[in-house]
Amino acid sequence: MNDNPLVLGIDLGTSGLRIAVINHQSKMLYTSSMKYSKGIEEWEDWLESCKELIKHLPKDLKAKLVSCSIAGTSGTLLACKNNGEPIGKALPYFLSCPEYSDEISNLVTQENVASSTSSSIGRALKLIALYGNKIILRHQADWLSGWFLNNWDFGEEGNNLRMGWEISSKSWPKKFNNLTWFNSLPKILSSGQIMGNISIKKAIELDLPKNLKIIAGTTDSNAGVLAAYSSKNDGITILGSTIVIKKFHNRPLKYKGITNHRLLDNWLCGGASNAGGSVLLDFFDIKYIKELSKQINPLKSSGLNLLPLAKQGERFPIDDPNLLPRLNPRPTSDVLYLHAILEGLARIEAKGWQKLNELGVNPPKRIITIGGGSKNITWKKIREKEIGIPIKTCNRPPAAGVACIALKAIL
């Protein structure tokens, strides 16, 4: 290994892809991002964005790369042929499948995070119904890792919790053995395990080192937690297209809608709402949000009680596929309407922290926030008022967090 090894982190988000390079001291040396041209359902967008960003990575950094790890949205699922060739579009993590609720409840217990109709099992059943049971099913990060390896056998455990993988027993639920599509599932590796070396063909195509190791990564929200360098007393909120809250705990939690990840030898527990920044963009563009936010008094109440879901259905802090958004009445003032939406999102986050507390998690002494929404100072003040906990902003991207996994694997 060279004296100054560098590692690459790749983060597949809801709206785009970002890469980051860090050194052996975890210092970020480079980062770049690209929006998808069509959307998260289009696997071509994932691949082309990744190729384009790596293409423009400075050659002196490329030459020193020794490992790479990938994070992706937890639950975005793609059907493929056995050679990894995608079939159709991916089904995004926010697609709920209530029509499969009976089949899901027959396969997993209520304590399993995959018991929700917003789990990957429902999306898997939908894809099997479309394309038959001879396909393979891969989540976003697992598929791209397979592309680098030219081997789609594997899946990382955190990315497969919503498919039913039981992290405590390190196995699929017993009833899965009877599934006609059991062979569609990946062989599971723990986060941080070496998956293999990049394929020679891909190394040449991307001008990457031929001995570059591909390391099993994690979910995009977990990558965000790692980027924040949080302590056991910190809570993490990711304000992206959705709101995700996480906190380290001494044991896994058992409750519908809760995910428990084993990350760098710790339990990381939390949940993800279907509400978040995407609902803001349904009404305003980013520039207008910035202008309106400056006119809001965050210490006062808007007087409105909105439930700003982007569409029907919620995962956390309550699991209800039939929950309807409440985005009316819309006042004539855009300032007041944005104020009310930001308050509604802050209340959802507050209820999330309350739910974790009810389940035995100590309230965080501070909340570290990452994601696009963390840059909005007005929203930060509204959140502090609603939640009652000091909030700090972290500017390191999740791609730098997943790079930390690639780094630990080779040290």
Image: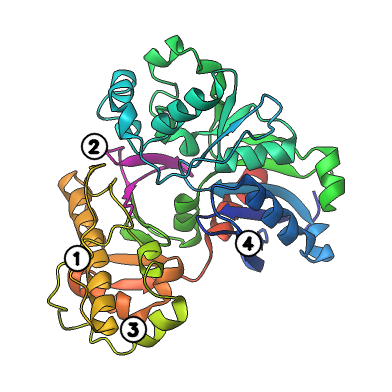
Which amino acid type is marked by label 1?
A: Leu
Looking at the rendered image, the disc whose residue lies closer to the viewer, 1 or 4, is: 1
Q: Is residue 335 above or below residue 70?
A: below
- Distance in Å between CA atoms under marks 3 and 1: 17 Å
Which one is earlier in the sequence, the residue at label 4 or at label 2?
4
Mark 4, other Cα within 10 Å: few <14 / some 14–19 / many ≥20: few
Which amino acid type is marked by label 2?
A: Tyr
Looking at the rendered image, the disc whose residue lies closer to the viewer, 2 or 1, is: 1
Looking at the rendered image, the disc whose residue lies closer to the viewer, 3 or 4, is: 3
What's the residue at 23%, 69% (across, down)?
389
Give the number of the disc on residue 293: 3
Which one is earlier in the sequence, the residue at label 3 or at label 2?
2
Residue 149: give x, y in percent of width and height.
Answer: 73, 36
Looking at the rendered image, the disc whose residue lies closer to the viewer, 3 or 2, is: 3
Residue 113: give x, y in percent of width and height.
Answer: 33, 35
Magenta residue span? 248-274
What's the residue at 28%, 49% (across, down)?
312
| Residue topped by disc 4 | 25
